[in-house]
Image (cartoon, rainbow, N blue to C red):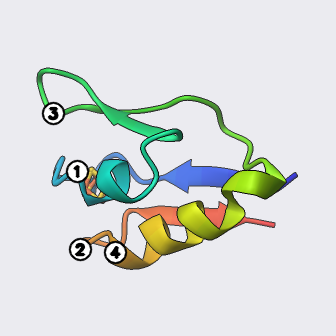
Amino acid sequence: MPRILVDFDRCEGHGLCEQTAPEVFRLDDEGVLHLTGDEVAPSEESAVSAAVRVCPVAALKVQL
Ligand code: SF4
């Protein structure tokens, strides 16, 4: 399955990924991003692709 790669040095905790795919991305109370899992389930692919596009600092990638 595809995997989500996060560049945590770039991530600024904007949370747009969480808004776009809340079942995959979570920000904690301190604005630190967590993934519910590294792999992208088929049912989550379109939401994760949208999250990759909306991240304002291009911190997300999907590795096929
Ligand atoms: S949208 Fe980008 S910068 Fe914002 S929390 Fe998600 S990965 Fe980090």
Q: 18 or 60: which is nearer to us?
A: 18
Q: CA distance from mark 2 to mark 1?
A: 10 Å
Give left or right: position of 26 versus 3.
left
Which residue type carries mark 2?
Pro
Mark 1, secondary structure of its residue: loop
Q: Residues within 10 Å of mark 4 (few under 14, many from 20)?
A: some
Real-space Cα distance between discs 3 and 4? Answer: 17 Å
Q: Secondary structure at mark 2?
A: loop
The quarter holding residue 63 reads: bottom right
Q: Residue furthest left?
A: 30
Provide the residue designation for mark 1. Answer: 15
Q: Is mark 1 within 8 Å of ligand 1?
A: yes
Q: Are marks 4 and 2 in contact (CB under 8 Å)?
A: yes
Badge 2 residue CB within 8 Å of ligand 1: yes
Secondary structure type for disc 4: helix
Frontmost residue, 39 versus 58: 39
